[in-house]
Image: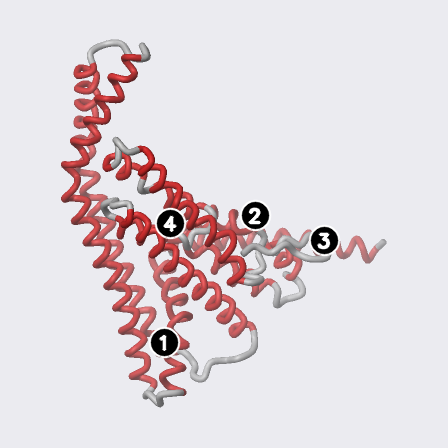
Amino acid sequence: MNTKLSEERAWLTTGSLMVLATVALAVAVIYTEPVMVPFVLAIFIVTIVSPVIDFLVARWRFPRSLAIAAALLLVLIVMFVFGLLLYTASLEINARAVDYTNRFSTLAKDGVAQLQAWDVVQGDAEQILNEVTTKLIGELKAKLPSLVSGMLGTATNLLSLGFLVIIFVVFLLAGRRSPPETSGIYAEIESAVRRYITTKFLISVATGVLVWLILWAFGLPMAGLFGMLAFLLNFIPSIGSVVATLLPIPVAVAEFSDQPWMIVGVIVLPGLVHTIIGNILEPKLMGEGLDMHPVTVLLALAAWGLFWGPIGMVLAVPITAVIHIILMQFVTTRPLGDLLAGKLPGQAKPQAAH
């Protein structure tokens, strides 16, 4: 009886301390976001490119400094390509803005006329649309300065984020031990995170390319942009694929308003790609994955999205996986690690999420 009471007190003490530590850590994570986000991104980038350095040093006998320079050049090229694609997409959006505005105006007129035919809306269609348009333009003019400043602030934040990421990558690569450790908690974390990120990256590339090809075959403008967004959003489990499927709908409606089957195809076929890859191919490639329960993944997405926004949602799964691995290394915190894996007290085997 005394032993059981002691165990319960120990559990209560450990749980209370973990709750306090979690709250303090959450506050620190939110407060240090401007520095921690590029630092965490740099850690994951280094985790991916470090095998390239090891290969160049071990197989091709590159000097370590030259191997680091080659890996850094690879990172810069990838970042430049993404920046170029985003810039090209923004130019295409600006070029088509007037045309799409006119098309949506025509669709709105047809919609109001149909509602009038059904006796849902009373009054002149032109007058209704003019009133709505006047209100929208008035609100846009009122909010335009804040929108412009917000866009400029976002662009500045992205530039500063990329610069800090490069700085952190340089120092992390320079301070990395070579040859790397092959055992211990750090090696386990690095192996698990590299396996997840590499597999997820390849799967996301395949998803983005397939979505782009499908939309291009339908003749949808900005197919490349939607393919790139499908690639990026695929890093967000569960939610990302849904958002990527729904994003092309406004453009599809504007382009194929007189061909409903084209609109259905633009939605359904990319949705099938996300479903097949996400539910069939990805679980097989991931294997046991990161040994986390689906509820854990959803809570991680919500928490890190609240802390760091969209970037936090992208990083949520690998960060939580690192926390899970660390918790499993110590006897005191191992029950919490089992809980992240979906293993409740007395349960024989956890249910893994892929």
> How many angstroms separate mark 1 from mark 3 (CA)?
41 Å
Sequence-first disc among 2 and 3: 2
Residue occupied by mark 4: 310
Sequence-first disc among 1 and 3: 1
**Which tag is nearer the camera, tag 2 or tag 3?**
2
Residue 306 shows up from this direction: no
Q: Amino acid at mark 3?
A: Pro
Sequence-first disc among 2 and 1: 1
Q: Count the numbered circles shown.
A: 4
> How many angstroms separate mark 2 from mark 3 (CA)?
17 Å
**Relative depth, front residue between 278 and 62:** 278
Sequence-first disc among 1 and 4: 1
**Relative depth, front residue between 170 and 298:** 298
Q: Amino acid at mark 4?
A: Pro
Q: Amino acid at mark 2?
A: Val
Where 269 sits versus 98, above or below? Answer: below
Q: Secondary structure at mark 1?
A: helix
Residue occupied by mark 1: 173
Name the mark on residue 295. Answer: 2
Residue occupied by mark 3: 345
Q: Secondary structure at mark 4?
A: helix
Q: Is residue 8 left or right of residue 313?
A: right
> How many angstroms separate mark 2 from mark 1 (CA)?
35 Å
Where residue 311 appears, x then y in whole percent?
37, 53
